[in-house]
Structures are given as C-alpha cells and as structure tokens.
Image (cartoon, rainbow, N blue to C red):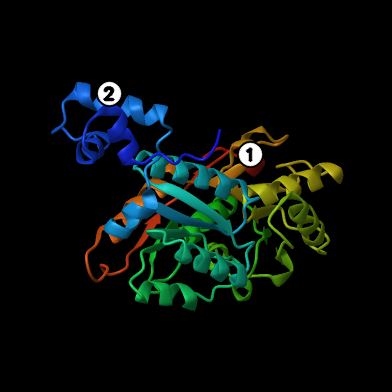
C-alpha cells in the first residue's frame, strides 16, 4: 500500500459531482441525498482518500488531538487510566498523543513543549511525583492554554481532577487503629520528598488516636514497583520495635511488601497487616488478597475529559480554574485482618 494522493477533485472526477458536493457528502450533510452520499463514500474508499486534518486545523484552529503526559508508563494504574482516556476521547472524535516524564520535571517540560509544537488542542497531565514545582504548568494556564492536571492538592491556579489521597489514607490508617493497631508504619515518601497528601493523611489519622509520628516507621521506597516495595519493607521491618500494620503508597509497591513477608515467614495479616492504594485488579489475587484504597477510574477519566473539553470550547479567556476531588473508599480484603 502506497501513500494516498487522492483529493476531493479526484473523487469529484470519478463520481461526476462537484467538489463542494463531495465535501458535503463526506461530512454526512443532510443536504446531500443518502444515495449520493453512499456513492461518494464508496469512491473515497476505493481511492484510499484520507481527510487532510492539517488543512482543516488551519481553518478551524483545532487539530482534534489531546496530549497526555504520564508520570510513569510502567505504573499499572496510569496505564489503565490512559487506556480509558484514549478510548473515551476516540468516542468524542479526538486522537490522543502520549508522552512520559519518567517522574522528572525536565522530561515533563520537554513533553509539554513537544505537544505544543504539534498544536494539540489541550493537555491532560499526570505531574511528576518527585518534583512539586508547578511553575511551568501555572505559566501554561496563564497563557490561556487548556490543561487539566490529574492529581490532587491545593489550588495552584490550574484545573485539577484527582483522588482525595489524604482522605483515602486517613480511612486506611483509621481502619488499622479501629482494629487495635498502635505501631502503624508506612511505605511512602514524607512531606519533604514530594507529594505530601498521603503522608498528611497518615499523620492526621495517627494524631486522631493520640499516636505520635515515629520517623522509624516511615520508609520511602526507592521507586514505584514491587522491587522497591520489597526492599522498603526490608528496611521498615528492621526497626527495633516492628510495626504490626503498614500502609503502602500503592498496590504495585505492596506486591513487593507481600513478597517480603512470604520470604521471611511472616503471616499476613496475623503478623503484619497491609493496606495499599489504587485497588489494582491484581491485588485481589495475591497470596493474601490485598485491602486497598479504592476509587472509580472511569469517573476520574470522565470528569477530567469533560473539564478539558469545556476549556477547549471556551472562547476568549478560559474560565476560572477548578479543583475536583473524588472521595475514595476502602476495599477490605484478607490483608488488613478484618472486614468492615
């Protein structure tokens, strides 16, 4: 198959209709009889005609493409969310361009610049987790460019749609407390190392039961996958007074924590209880089915896309930015020791 050089004029020559009639028929205009539209569409397929979206964009100033920046393409929850975003945008007539920042600000900025050079209509961005400097994103919004961040946090003047991580972790740790745990650890970064929402929820839940924060019970995984979880759990459980329960920043890391317990002969939840975050499909099928902070990805996806398309459709100055948070719930399974 070679490149198509077919133009509207070629379809017009084959069918005997004018270029204007051909154009209207290919846009499914009711002004053209259905039989004529069918004939013209058949000729277009036979000639391997493809619409010139570049030419259209010069007229409409829309390319019908959205840029999606992922922080980590290996993270299962981001992979699943991106799949849903692409599927939903396709239904709405938009194509999706993908890029990953590998959790670095430099690569995130490069991805944004690349998308802008390709004249995408708007962007959905998972900000890099290791750097909470949003100045480049704030500048993008101030330049009247449609962008929605898929994250949670304080209002920084950029539209956000995300999960209320602080509330989710608070619920998880309170669940441990209600089961009688007092030594509760966490495999997650602390407030000074990046996103502080989960850490704040952890500390607030402890404080609500009169339990002080013990730095010995907080370990930052050196990565975002099972291997990082395994070695973070190894460090945490080396504490002189081990925790009896552990909140893990995400289910993918928790896979490694469960494996560490198996390797070292610890029973889950009898010797140590675990709760993760994101409620991945795999979590239910671990040797100790994992309790997790759960939320509906499809709702997150729909809200983010709806907001972005509203920004794209705005004429003139964009509407005031809005922060939308989804409150998560707990999916309780064997690993935490008790059903709600």
Relative height, residue 276 to residue 236 (above, below):
above
The quadrant where residue 40 appears: top left
Picture coordinates of residue 260, whole percent (x, y)? 81, 48
Relative height, residue 215 to residue 285 (above, below):
below
Q: Are marks 2 and 1 in contact (CB under 8 Å)?
A: no
Element under disc 1: helix
Closer to us: 63 or 81: 63
Picture coordinates of residue 36, whole percent (x, y)? 21, 25
Left or right side of 69 for 45: left
Which of marks 1 and 2 precedes in the sequence? 2
Q: Which residue is farthest top? A: 35
- Which numbered mark, 2 or 1, is in the foreground of this view? 2
How far is disc 2 from disc 1 in space, using C-alphas?
53 Å
Q: Residue at x 44, y 41 (%)?
A: 5
* Image quadrant in which the N terminus is located: top right
The quadrant where residue 217 appears: bottom right
Relative height, residue 6 to residue 174 (above, below):
above
Residue 304 visible in the shown view: no
Q: Which residue is mark 1?
A: 283
Closer to us: 293 or 80: 80
Q: Residue at x 42, y 75 (%)?
A: 138
Closer to us: 302 or 294: 302
Element under disc 2: helix
Picture coordinates of residue 49, whole percent (x, y)? 40, 36
Q: Which residue is mark 2?
A: 39
């Amino acid at each position: 198959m070679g490149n198509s050089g077919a133009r509207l004029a070629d379809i017009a020559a084959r069918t005997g209709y004018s270029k204007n009639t051909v154009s209207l028929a290919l846009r499914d205009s009711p002004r053209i009889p259905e039989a004529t539209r069918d004939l013209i569409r058949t000729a277009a397929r036979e000639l391997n005609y493809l619409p010139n979206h570049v030419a259209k964009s010069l007229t409409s100033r829309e390319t019908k493409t959205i840029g999606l920046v992922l922080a980590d393409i290996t993270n299962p929850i981001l992979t699943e969310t991106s799949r849903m975003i692409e599927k939903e945008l396709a239904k709405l007539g938009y194509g999706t361009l993908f890029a990953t920042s590998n959790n670095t600000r430099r690569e995130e900025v490069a991805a944004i610049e690349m998308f802008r050079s390709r004249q995408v209509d708007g962007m959905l961005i998972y900000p890099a987790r290791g750097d909470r400097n949003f100045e480049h994103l704030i500048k993008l919004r101030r330049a009247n460019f449609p962008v929605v961040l898929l994250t949670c946090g304080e209002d920084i003047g950029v539209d956000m749609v995300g999960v209320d991580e602080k509330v989710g972790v608070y619920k998880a740790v309170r669940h441990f407390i209600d089961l009688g745990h007092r030594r509760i650890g966490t495999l997650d970064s602390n407030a000074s190392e990046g996103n502080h929402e989960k850490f704040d929820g952890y500390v607030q839940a402890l404080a609500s039961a009169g339990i002080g924060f013990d730095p010995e019970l907080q370990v930052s995984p050196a990565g975002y996958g099972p291997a990082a979880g395994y070695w973070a759990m190894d460090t945490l459980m080396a504490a002189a007074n081990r925790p009896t329960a552990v909140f893990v920043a995400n289910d993918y890391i928790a896979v490694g924590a469960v494996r560490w317990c198996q390797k070292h002969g610890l029973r889950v939840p009898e010797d140590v209880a675990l709760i993760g975050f994101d409620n991945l499909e795999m979590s239910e099928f671990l040797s100790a089915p994992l309790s997790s902070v759960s939320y509906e990805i499809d709702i997150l996806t729909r809200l983010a896309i709806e907001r972005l398309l509203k920004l794209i459709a705005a004429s003139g100055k964009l509407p005031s930015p809005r922060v939308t948070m989804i409150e998560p719930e707990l999916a309780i399974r064997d690993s935490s020791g008790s059903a709600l």
